């Protein structure tokens, strides 16, 4: 028998229930009891036609299980999102209750299904604390409440709003995220009153504003958005750069294995990226490389570059994570130097004395000598040694003597001369004070001291890197000679030997390099419009024309135009507004192309008439 007790301990017989169980059952679960209530439980043994003795106990039911882990999941400007963990047992649902302290007698009350574990309370006031109660509702009734205090968000402005890393046409806006904001409105206004804005999602805290005018001040504002409500505005001012490109990039102090690269500083830049590698003609001589440099660096020394190789340099300006326009230049490392001023200073029937000029970077010199039918002999000499006497030679024999500079493990190109050792007869005195007195694009002029007793001089010249040797005999009265029709920008080996009749004396060697072809000067882009640019330059004397080329900086397709020698300007149309182009020009000398001159120009309307 199950009988509830009153608060005074009296049996409430009108609510008594009877439960029957079989004889083999020794335990039972009593259900449908009221929580927090005392019950009298009496157990009777039942026999056929007889009820036996009884045993009675008194028990008290516990409270209904409450909700656990009741918490605020997310605060909003006008809402609170709540979460909880459901108790075990059969639930009818949940009841959420908020007293309205500013409106006596009123409250927020919401009945929720028993299979959910979160709920959003909206319609609240901004920046206000709320006490929230939740009840687990059972068939037997509600549990004890669980309470928490939550606070809605305050309508605040964006903090730490920065507009930085300005280029000629972009700026970067950064800000600290605002808690609870569902998005942001970013607005920028130009000096002429033009206003643009963009709505950004809640996950944004960075945006690059593009399409701005160079050298212009902008007002940039941002405000957080909370659903349909906009927060306070935060303002910042910024000015775009007049120019974001490096104007000068050059290589100096070029040697066989190094070069110093320098450039002008760009205001507002956060750093630079320098890239270098062989030009296509020298592909495979070295690998392309690049590195990032800080904004205070305007010079960098390239080391361990390949000798006698043309390199292309490209320098990009960095503005934070944005990469500005690049500028390119080329340079060529020196070849492994050949020994200059190699000559015979004296000779006898069994010895030849030679000397030469020092070579920068050489670690030692290799001197070799041999006759046409003899075995070559060599000797390595320290870099400080600039002369040597070869002894134990055969009289009246022609010796070929070569010398080359050694650079660590590499041998430079060799240079050679021939000398005949004499017998009893008097030797021919070599030419004295031989030197190159004038160098042109296609010519050299030599001068020397007159040698007594000679019948003339024989002059030899040959390109240092190989080619056809040419020679010319001049009269004894000559003390100078001009070689014409030489290749521009080329090194030559030149020897002058005195002659007496058919006998040729010891040659004296000099080396020289012809000048480069003149390049176009004053190359510039003027009168730029939204789709065209007028290119101007200074005419180069003696040219047969000009080769003009242009392409967009990020496209390899190049357009060209061949112009006559009278041109000093040319208009290019159909260009894309806001894009940067590479314009190049070469002078033409018949079939020969002169050195290139290059400029970079962004296509935009020229504001200065």
Image (cartoon, rainbow, N blue to C red):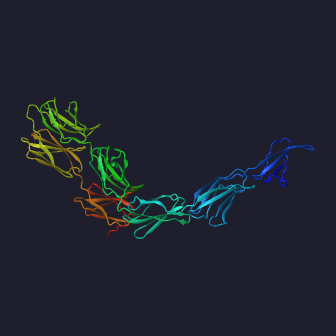
In the displayed orientation, state which residue is furthest to the left.
453
Q: Observer-nearest residue: 253 or 4?
A: 4
Counting from the top left corner in percent of width and height, residue 74 is at 58, 57
Whether residue 28 sits left or right of residue 120 in the image: it is right
Residue 212 drawn above or below residue 300: below
Q: Is residue 559 visible?
A: no
Q: Is residue 210 left or right of residue 345?
A: right
Residue depicted at 68% across the width and 53% down the height: 66
Specify the quadrant of the image occupied by residue 257.
top left
In the foreground, 357 or 439: 357
Residue at the farthest front position: 8
Q: Which image quadrant: the C terminus?
A: bottom left
State the count of labels.
0
In this rendering, the answer to whether 348 lies above or below 128 is: above
From where the camera sits, is residue 163 visible?
yes
Residue 135 percent across, percent down from the top left:
69, 56
Side of 585 where 226 appears, left or right: right
Q: Horizontal placement of 378 versus 100: left or right?
A: left
Q: Residue furthest right?
A: 49
For the residue pair 293 and 343, the one nearer the viewer reads as: 293
Where residue 484 sits in the image (x, y, percent)? 18, 50
The quarter of the picture where residue 211 lies is bottom left
Residue 595 picture location, percent across and down: 27, 54
């Amino acid at each position: 028998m199950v009988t509830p007790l009153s608060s005074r301990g009296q049996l409430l017989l009108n609510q008594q229930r009877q439960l029957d169980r079989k004889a083999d059952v020794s335990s039972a679960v009593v259900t449908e009891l009221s929580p927090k209530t005392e019950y009298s439980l009496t157990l009777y043994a039942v026999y056929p036609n007889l009820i036996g003795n009884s045993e009675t106990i008194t028990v008290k039911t516990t409270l209904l299980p409450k909700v656990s882990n009741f918490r605020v999941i997310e605060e909003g400007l006008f809402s609170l999102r709540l979460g909880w963990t459901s108790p075990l047992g059969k639930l009818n649902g949940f009841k959420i209750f908020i007293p309205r302290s500013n409106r006596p007698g009123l409250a927020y009350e919401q009945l929720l299904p028993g299979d959910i574990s979160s709920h959003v309370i909206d319609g609240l006031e901004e920046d206000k604390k709320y006490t929230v109660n939740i009840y687990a509702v059972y068939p037997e009734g509600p549990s004890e409440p669980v309470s928490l205090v939550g606070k809605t968000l305050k309508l605040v402005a964006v903090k730490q709003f920065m507009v930085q890393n300005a280029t000629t046409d972009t700026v970067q806006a950064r800000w600290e995220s605002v808690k609870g904001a569902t998005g942001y409105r970013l607005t920028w206004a130009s000096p002429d009153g033009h206003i643009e804005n963009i709505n950004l999602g809640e996950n944004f805290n960075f945006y690059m504003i593009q399409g701005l005018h160079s050298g212009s001040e902008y007002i940039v504002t941002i405000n957080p958005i909370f659903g349909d409500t906009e927060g306070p505005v935060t303002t910042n001012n910024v000015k775009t750069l007049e120019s974001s490109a490096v104007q000068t990039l050059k290589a100096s102090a070029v040697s066989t294995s190094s070069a110093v690269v320098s450039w002008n500083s760009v205001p507002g830049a956060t750093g630079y990226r320098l890239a270098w590698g062989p030009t296509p003609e020298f592909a495979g001589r070295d690998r392309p490389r690049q590195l990032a440099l800080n904004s205070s660096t305007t010079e960098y020394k390239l080391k361990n570059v390949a000798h006698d190789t043309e390199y292309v340099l490209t320098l990009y300006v960095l503005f934070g994570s944005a990469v500005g326009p690049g500028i390119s230049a080329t340079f060529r490392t020196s070849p492994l130097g050949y020994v200059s001023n190699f000559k015979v200073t004296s000779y006898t029937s069994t010895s030849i004395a030679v000397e030469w000029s020092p070579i920068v970077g050489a670690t030692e010199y290799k001197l070799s000598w041999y006759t046409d039918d003899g075995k070559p002999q060599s000797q390595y000499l320290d870099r400080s040694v600039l002369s040597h006497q070869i002894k134990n030679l055969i009289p009246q024999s022609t010796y070929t003597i070569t010398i080359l500079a050694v650079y660590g493990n590499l041998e430079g190109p060799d240079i050679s001369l021939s000398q005949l050792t004499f017998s009893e007869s008097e030797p021919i005195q070599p030419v004295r004070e031989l030197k190159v007195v004038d160098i042109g694009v296609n010519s050299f002029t030599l001068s020397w001291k007159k040698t007594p007793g000679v019948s003339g001089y024989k002059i030899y010249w040959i390109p240092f890197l190989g080619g056809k040797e040419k020679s010319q005999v001049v009269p004894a009265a000559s003390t100078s000679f001009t070689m014409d029709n030489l290749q521009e920008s080329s090194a030559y080996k030149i020897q002058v030997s005195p002659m007496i009749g058919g006998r040729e004396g010891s040659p004296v060697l000099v080396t020289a390099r012809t000048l480069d072809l003149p390049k176009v000067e004053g190359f510039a882009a003027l009168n730029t419009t939204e789709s065209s640019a007028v290119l101007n330059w200074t005419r180069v004397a003696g040219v047969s024309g000009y080769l003009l080329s242009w392409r967009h900086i990020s496209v390899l397709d190049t357009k060209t135009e061949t112009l006559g020698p009278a041109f000093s300007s040319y208009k290019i149309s159909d260009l894309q507004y806001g894009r940067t182009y590479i314009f190049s020009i070469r002078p033409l000398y018949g079939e020969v192309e002169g050195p290139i001159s290059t400029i970079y120009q962004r296509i935009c309307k020229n504001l200065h008439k």
